[in-house]
Amino acid sequence: MEKPIYTKQKEIEATAEFSVSSPWKNEDVGFNWVTNGYPYLHNHNFWEIMVCFDGSIRHTINNYTYVMRPGDACIIRPEDKHMLRTDNGESQHINFLIKNRYMEKLLAVFDEGLADELYKINVLNFSVDKDELPGLFHKTTSLQTVSGFPLTKEILINCKLLITNLVQQYVFKLNSMDSAYPLWLKKLLIELDKREVFTLSIDEIVKLTPYSYSHLVQLFKKNVNMSLIEYLTAKRIEYAKNRLANTNDTTLQISMEAGYSSLSHFNHTFKSLTSKTPSEYRKYSKIKH
C-alpha cells in the first residue's frame, strides 16, 4: 500500500457529521466559511464542495496532495479521506455541505449513473472562472444567517442554486474535454487517472481495452493527439513531481512508486520533461511554497 504523505502530521481519522457541521442541520444543504486549515485526516457522512477564495491551501485527499489557490474547487465524497493545511495560516475558502440523498438526486438530473462514475475518479477537482469569483463570493456572503433569525426560503433556494451551478461546472469539465471520445476511451482515461493503473505495463493496459496493442496505440493517438506512451509518461512524471514537492521520500522510492524500475531512466525522463533533475525540482518546489 502506498505510504501516506501526511505521516508527519498527527493522524486522526474521524467522520464529520452533517448535523454538527452545517448551520442548517435539518435541511438538505448548508455551508461554512473557513479561514484556516484542518490538518487532521477525516471524512464526512455527506458530500462537500470546497472553493478557495483567498490564499493557498495544501489539500491532501486520498493520498494525493496539491495546492489550491483562488478559483480552485473540489468535490469531496463521503468516503474520501482528506485534510487541509495552510502555508502561512492565511486562507479563505467555503464549504458547501450536501446530504447524500439530495446530491444523488442532483447528479441524477445529469445522468442516472453519474454518482457511480464519480466514485471511480480519485480526485474531483476543477476550477471556477476567476471572473466569476467576485460574484460567487458576494452571493455566498448573502447566505449568512444571524443567530436568532430563522432561515428563509429564499436563502435556502439560493444556496441550492449555487451548489447546482458548481456541480454543473464540474460535470461540464468532466464531459467537455472528451465529449467526442468513444465510451471505451472515456473509461480508459478514468482508469489511467489511478496510480495503480498508469504504472502498469503496456501489455496490462492493453487488456483493459477491447483492442490489440497496434490498434489501441493507433486509436489513442488519433483521439488524444498524443501517443499512449507519452500520455503514461506524463502521468507518471506528474505523480513524481507531486511526491517530490510534498514528501521527504527518496528519489528512488518515488521513481519506483511512479512505475520506473531504473532510477537512471527515471532521472533522464524527468529532466527531459521538466528541464530539472528530481533533486533540483524538489529544491525549487520548497522555495516556491
Image: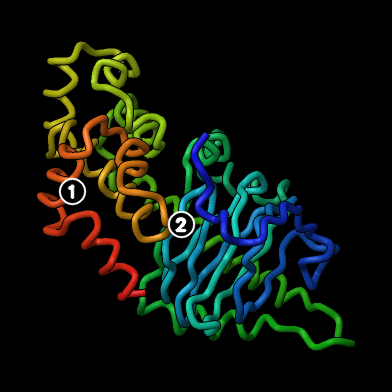
Q: Where's residue 255, x and y in %? A: 30, 41
Is residue 27 left or right of 84 when viewed as pictured?
A: right
Residue at 39% over, 64% down: 127
- Binning the other alpha carbons within 10 Å of mark 2 as few (below 14), some (14 to 19) or many (20 upward) gives many
**Which quarter of the rendering shows the C terminus?**
bottom left
Tag shown at residue 65: 2
Is residue 166 left or right of 261 when viewed as pictured?
A: right
Q: Which residue was labeled with disc 1?
A: 270
Q: Where's residue 76, x and y in %? A: 58, 54
| Mark before the other along the chain sequence, 2 or 1 | 2
- Binning the other alpha carbons within 10 Å of mark 1 as few (below 14), some (14 to 19) or many (20 upward) gives many
Q: Residue lying furthest right in this view? A: 148
Residue type (three-letter) at the residue carrying disc 2: Thr
Up/down of 261 relative to 4, above or below: above
Considering the numbered disc 2 on the image, is that residue within a helix, a strand or a loop?
Answer: strand
User: Dividing the picture into quarters, in which one does residue 215 lie?
Assistant: top left
Looking at this view, is 163 or 204 the one in front?
204
Up/down of 106 relative to 276, above or below: above
Residue type (three-letter) at the residue carrying disc 1: Phe
Considering the numbered disc 1 on the image, is that residue within a helix, a strand or a loop?
Answer: helix
